[in-house]
Image: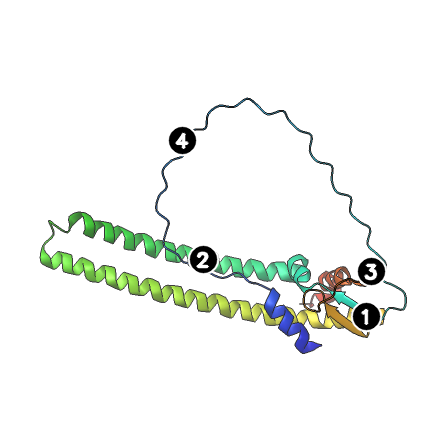
Amino acid sequence: MRGYVLAVALSVLLTAAPTFAQPAPAQPAPKPAAPTAPATQQPPPAPVPQQPARPFPEGAKVAYINIQRIANESTEGKSATAKVQALVQKKQAEANEKNKALQADQQKLAAGSSVMSEASRAELEKKIERTNVELQRMTQDAQQEVQELQQQLQNQFQQKLMPIVQQVAATKGIHVLFSAADSGIVWADPGLDITADVIKQFDGPAATPKP
């Protein structure tokens, strides 16, 4: 069970990855749209009624959980995702600043190459080359740092989730627990889905370590 949860958690949790692409070229301003007659306001669609939760079948020894849902909805999963996103945004901002400096030097070289002295032009070209190398290294380091944080948070998530899963399964007398995304289940009684029970227990006071 422990190895199973780890394998699944690593495949579904915290998939954010940093991107440090060059800024896209400026797009021309869109033409103003021709005026149109105001549309008739339509009433908002009626909310889809939520199906009541099915009770866990009495005497059932098999159940399943949705680990992706646990990662998305649990407090622990949301916190981990937010940490990864914050790091990605920080690294992207740093790369964007380096990109701006690089583009400014490239534009300076393109605009003044014909009037620059040979020494000034050579110095600026070397500076552009150094900035390019620094940007490549910055990108590689950022990607590695984000991946290491992802791995760390995934391991922590799995270590905290596993006892909760075992506790809920034991409480319900479950002998076999499947992952809904990986087990190949074609159909199952919705009452066998104990994901909500795991999330509730995961977020409960008992799951929060005391200071």
Name the residue type under label 4. Answer: Lys
Q: Which residue is mark 2?
A: 90
Give the position of the C terminus as an image quadrant.
bottom right
Name the residue type under label 2. Answer: Lys
Image spot of residue 48 (x, y percent) = 75, 42
Tags 3 and 2 touching, CB below 8 Å? no
Question: Alpha-carbon distance for marks 3 and 2?
Answer: 43 Å
Image spot of residue 169 (x, y percent) = 79, 70
- Residue at 37% across, 49% down: 24
Q: Earlier in the sequence, mark 4 or mark 3?
A: 4
Say if 23 sits above or below 184 in the image: above
Residue density around tag 4, few if under 14, some if 14–19, many if 20 or more, within 10 Å: few
- Secondary structure under badge 4? loop
Q: Earlier in the sequence, mark 1 or mark 3?
A: 1
Answer with left or right where residue 161 lies relative to residue 62. left
Farthest top residue?
A: 37
- Secondary structure under badge 1? strand
Question: Alpha-carbon distance for marks 1 and 3?
Answer: 11 Å
Q: Which residue is mark 1?
A: 62
Name the residue type under label 1. Answer: Val
Question: Alpha-carbon distance for marks 4 and 3?
Answer: 55 Å
Q: Which residue is mark 3?
A: 191
